Image (tube, rainbow, N blue to C red):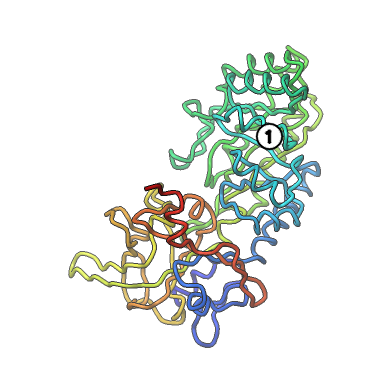
Amino acid sequence: MNEQIARLILLPSTAEVNSRGHLIIGGCDTVELTTEFGTPLYLFDESSLRSRCAEFKAEFHKRFEDTAILYACKAFLNKALITLFMEEGLGMDVVSGGEISIARSVGFPMNKVCFPGNNKSTEELILALEAGVGRIVVDNFHELETLGKVARTKGSKADILIRISPGVDPKTHQYITTGNVDSKFGFPMVKGEEAVVKAMSMPEINLMGLHFHIGSQIFETEPFQQAVKIMIKFAADMNRKHGFMLKELSVGGGYAIQYTLDAPAPPISVYAEAITSSIISQCQRFKMKLPKLIIEPGRSMVGQAGIALYTAGAVKDIPGVRCYVSVDGGMADNICPALYGTRLEAVVANDMRKQVAGEVTIAGKFCESGDILIRGIKLPQVSAGDILAVAGCGAYSLPKAANYNASFRPAVVLVKDGKARLIRSRETLEDLTRHDII
């Protein structure tokens, strides 16, 4: 089988090849899109996004009816996408005052928003209360005290979840591990009881439940089950000792996506079954009423729905060493390979039917030796002007984009039924220099 055709499984669900051998997504010819909008160009497939929303809702709700699905917008935040998720009935997980403000700007229902974060400012907490954010996820004693003072001053009451680090190893990259003991996030379990008691003693605080998030890109379900077991037991202990009632439990996100052909991720149904069955069985064990379940998918909601399109330029073949194919983007718009060692795959979008010819390394254009997008991928012979489509770029690429080497952040389009809609324009020199002062 043509290896490029095999990689269609890594692309948005509408990906296909037309009679010209061009990659089609959402009914749009990706090669023609690059002519119209230029490169680098990021593309999101609306059908893939809405299908993913439907899949999460179906798989969790049929197992655990009282489940709130919040999109973790740190994966990619854009007004058009927020509006789409609002239409699909999702809530939102935000981590800054900026994200709160962008959500408000499109009329997102703030009662469906949760606000975690390890160092929220006083101004951000004031904004959250004024905006009517549904749940503030308290991360530490400093925040709990600050939030109490802010709520007292405003004469309001804050509905909160307490974030606990359950001490579970999610078996993923160290940079995206968040639920172990040695983490900047959450109360360590040894301080959990003190946090619950303090929150319950504060009249301006309404403790609704608990929150944990153990990491990202987690392929195994056992870490989720282990964390649920720890947290339900903790909640039962707090009920027995202090009368705490677990009304809500957020289990965070971290569900993996498939970036490469050799690393398939479990379907959402597998995560849903593992998490919900664990909550139900543990609540039965401790004779507890089932809490409302909150999940926070980010990468798993948008990662595979987005691709990056680049134009190939210089090809440098070092005999017996390596062949470099340089593209007109790289680590400034797509930092994850350099930061996390994320493995990605690509196709030649203008020649999908061509058989692979050899192994190349796709390099970015920026002045860093570490600016490598893909090491050692088998592709057809690539020449200057070819269009490369890199899969799995819907999450964390654009939010972490920078202006390194005075580059412009790329344009973004949303495609559906053969039509492409520009949802973010490419930056210009004016954008780049508007804050400079002489």
Percent x, y of residue 193: 64, 16
Judged from this view, the residue extending furthest toward the front is 438
Return the residue at label 1.
Answer: 128
Q: Residue at x 61, y 66 (%)?
A: 414
Amino acid at dot 1: Ala
Mark 1, secondary structure of its residue = helix
Percent x, y of residue 126: 67, 30
Q: Residue at x 61, y 30 (%)?
A: 123
Q: Residue at x 55, y 79 (%)?
A: 29
Question: Quadrant of residue 331 in the image?
Answer: bottom left
Q: Residue at x 48, y 75 (%)?
A: 34
Judge left or right: residue 70 versus residue 423. right
Judged from this view, the residue extending furthest toward the bottom is 19
Percent x, y of residue 373: 37, 59
Judge left or right: residue 406 versus residue 163. left
185 is higher (above) or lower (below) than 109: above
